[in-house]
Image: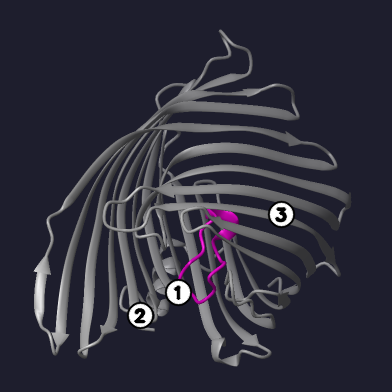
Amino acid sequence: MTRSAFSFPAAILLCVVLSVPVFAEPGKIVPFVSVKQEYSDNILFSSSNEVEDSITTGTVGLVYLYDSERVDARLDGRLYHLFYRDNNQLDSTDGSAFANWDYQVTERIGVGAAADYRNDSRPDEDLNTTGLLLPGDIEAANFSVSSNYMFSEATRGEATLKYGLNEIEEINTDESNDGIRLDLAFSKNLSKVFENTTGLFNFSYFHYNADYETTRNIPGPTTRTTYQNFASDVAQMYAGFSRDITELYNFYLQVGASYTKTTEGTRIKSTGASTGDVTLADQNDSNWGGVLLAGLNYDGLYYDVGLSISQDMRGGLGTNGVVQRSAVSLGIDRKFSDGFWVTFDTSCYLNQNERQTQVDLDDLTFNIQPGFRYEFLETFTLTGLYRFTSIDDRERDTTTERNMVYLVIRKDFDL
């Protein structure tokens, strides 16, 4: 796979720079190693040709934490190698890095920056958070800067600017995405009128651009390459409130609207026995949608519970454009002792996009994941879980299912 958008060493260097001051008091360095043993009954996520295998993943990494009166920084970098027992042609070395830096300039003003990078060969890496299956190897880099300001003791505002680059490669197909996004968020304490209540207002605008290239051979012989571009502008505005019902329960609700305008372009180039270069007329489309963000959280002595419901527009990595995503998720953590937790997570995602020059997207993804986490001998952690995933492609009328179980043991070295 060609790595042209970004390089892993460059990502690590940038993350270190963002974590300044580095390797100084009151900083903390935590190297770690881990081994993950996994079994999957459908490693390729195929609806008709299921292949089972066992996968061993070895990981080395480092976490650096810095926390002072004004600066809060974190660096997390790791390399991991995947060994497939039977399908060793899928073996790969991947990596990721993340860094964030927050600085309190004055009592009223704060600034921050963040960067993350990943080089990943697993198609299921985003299933639990987006419901989307990645069609190939991915290289992704994201950057953001932010600032927040306290207008008064009761009113706060925050602005965040983000930029991302993504590349996905598979056989005869390449997809590259880039996007820029601006988020504005305001909150106001309304306790003088409504007890334990905070008013919320958000506005976001983002431009998302996806280039999709496919190559196929046709009789002749002729090679035909199709270049497609999907450029979307999305504006979303929503408002609501959060309320502390008791010391243990918190509820939030925001509703609003979104507007999306998309331009689709297509160019077809033929070489070989038949040559030609044809550019088709652009296809334009626009639509309105709803925005909903709601949830209920419980933070108790032995139980932590989170329930969330959402619908909004997002960049759809691996889908050649933006998607309207509707999601419901539930997470439960049960603490049995200082070092032992039982967990249960389930989620459902509906990703949709109506397009003029490609097949529409209409995927319903369901995940269910019980597991446990055990911390022992101070720096050792054992994690295990079972995950069932079902992806219903309602446009093509196919269903893909997978059962997976794994155990991970991790050793932290507290320097």
Instruction: Report whether 372 appears left or right of 176.
Output: right
Residue at the image point whose x is 72% and y is 62% from the top:
387
What SS does tag 1 mark? loop
Q: Which mark is residue 368?
A: 3
For the residues bearing labels 1 and 3, Cβ distance under 8 angstroms: no
> Position of 319 compared to 307: left or right?
left
Residue 186 vertical position relative to residue 264 in the rendered view, above or below: above
Distance in Å between CA atoms under marks 2 and 3? 34 Å
Quadrant housing the N terminus: bottom left
Location of mark 1 (residue): 136
Q: Is residue 398 above or below residue 38?
A: above
Q: Find the distance from the CA under tag 1 to the CA under tag 2.
A: 13 Å
Q: Which residue is mark 2?
A: 3
For the point 56% across and 9% down, the residue is: 192
Kindly identify the amino acid type of the residue bearing the numbered disc 1: Gly
Magenta stretch bounds: 119-136
Q: Residue 393, percent across and down?
A: 52, 57
How far across and how far down the image is residue 357, in percent?
Answer: 26, 57
**Which comes before the other along the chain, label 2 or label 3?**
2
Whether residue 358 sits left or right of residue 223 in the image: it is: right
Marks 1 and 3 sit apart, C-alpha to C-alpha, by 24 Å
Q: Residue at x 31, y 78 (%)?
A: 4
- Earlier sequence position, callout 1 versus callout 3: 1
Q: Position of residue 88 (x, y in %)?
A: 60, 91
Q: Position of residue 145 (x, y in %)?
A: 36, 50
Residue positioned most to the top: 193
Which image quarter is the C terminus in? bottom right
Nearer-the-camera pick, 413 or 338: 338
Residue flagged by tag 3: what amino acid is it? Ile
Q: Quadrant of residue 237?
A: top left
Compared to residue 305, the image places residue 231 above or below, namely below
